[in-house]
Amino acid sequence: MNVRITGTGSALPGKILTNAELEKSVDTTDEWITTRTGIKERRIAADGEYTSTFAAEASRRALAMAGVPPEEIDLIIIGTVTPDFPFPSTACIVQDLLGATNATAFDLSAACSGFLYGLSIAEKYIRSGAARKILVVGAEILSRIVDWQDRNTCVLFGDGAGAVVLEASEEADHSLLSTHTFSNGAHWNLLFQQGSGSRNPATASRTIDERLIYLNMEGNDVFKHAVRGMEEAAVRALNANGLSPADISLLIPHQANRRIIDATAKRLGIGSERLFINLHRYGNTSSASIPIALDEANHLGILKPDSKLLLVAFGGGFTYASALIKW
Ligand code: ACO
């Protein structure tokens, strides 16, 4: 059985936070943020907006494009590190919001690789015959776990969600050709959230140290591992399909940092004309970044029938992953 993406969707908060606005609250400059990261602005969720809000809206848009009613969905997978609650899963909340009454729903923790990990699991469900129609979503509200006083991290992240509908298909053309996932737990402590889990539970103190809640990152180390990991994941995808970088129509990388993306593309020999970038507008939205980019590229009409898309991600864990799609 082949696997086809039949719908894409994305949803972003309305509020835009520019680098110029950040200059007023932390010791930073538009020039520093732009040259070190490529980010110009990011979206920030408003009070009353949750991860499920954007996950559900992105899913509605993907379902509408696919022409699939919610009750036909067999499985909902949401990659997120900022769920509405530790439990129940945000996927169960989204199931309810959509009325996807026949779906099994769960969240997946793979940080910025969450969407591609989800795609990989969904692919296996469909190929095995266990499901025919699946929603895979990446959704985050990172603005609620970053320290807005820490210039090292607060300038990097943003909020939003992206979703795809995957369907079983008889056609070998226009399909998901492969997915690959990797983990390297030796470096779990280079990028993590210390507080609120079983090691530093919120119940341990009536006034849990707020800093434990914030995202913690060794930026320089993460940078080096990210470039190597994304290259490895991309090469594995190419080799598995007997393709070379010259065959790729568009590289859609996780949107973490312009310099990470450029270094990865350079190592692969993929020029800027075959590179999709939107992080200047959204910052790093973790698991949401690839499905948001895929949806934007789809709406821009730059995904042609037979385009070969290479998706690559890297994130906390460390986790990294790739997917090759014949559009
Ligand atoms: N504004 C102004 N100065 C800053 C800022 C800021 N926002 N942030 C840091 N600086 C300062 C530092 O304090 C340091 O000052 P010092 O030399 O006086 O100590 C100086 O700038 C250089 O800091 P570095 O950390 O060496 O800067 P670098 O060029 O490595 O860029 C960055 C930092 C952007 C975080 C980079 O390491 C990076 O992008 N790493 C990858 C991290 C990432 O993307 N993580 C996301 C999650 S993982 C993923 O999605 C792949």
Image (cartoon, rainbow, N blue to C red):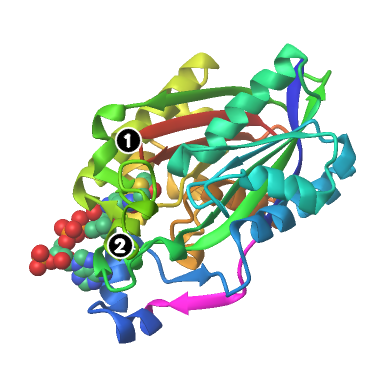
State which region is magenta. 11-19
Q: Quadrant of residue 320?
A: top left
- Label placed on residue 236: none
The amino acid beneath tag 1 is Arg
Q: Name the residue nearer the viewer: 82 or 207.
A: 207
Q: Quadrant of residue 224?
A: top left
The reply to whether residue 88 is in sight is yes
Can you say whether 241 is above or below 297 in the image?
above
Residue at 61%, 69% (x, y): give it. 13
Q: Quadrant of residue 6?
A: top right
Q: If the image is split into quadrants, where does the C terminus sit?
A: top right
Circle 1 residue = 267
Question: In the picture provided, is 277 more to the left or to the right than 207?
Answer: right
Residue at 63%, 51% (x, y): give it. 162
Q: Position of residue 134 (x, y in %)?
A: 75, 33
Q: Is residue 15 magenta?
A: yes
Q: Position of residue 269 (x, y in %)?
A: 38, 35
- Label placed on residue 153: 2
Alpha carbon separation for disc pair 1 and 2: 26 Å
Question: In the picture provided, is 273 more to the left or to the right than 204?
Answer: right
Question: In the picture provided, is 232 more to the left or to the right than 171?
Answer: left
Question: In the picture provided, is 72 more to the left or to the right than 32?
Answer: right
The amino acid beneath tag 2 is Thr
Q: Is residue 278 magenta?
A: no
Q: Circle 1: is it few (<14), some (14-19), or many (20+) Cα within 10 Å?
A: few
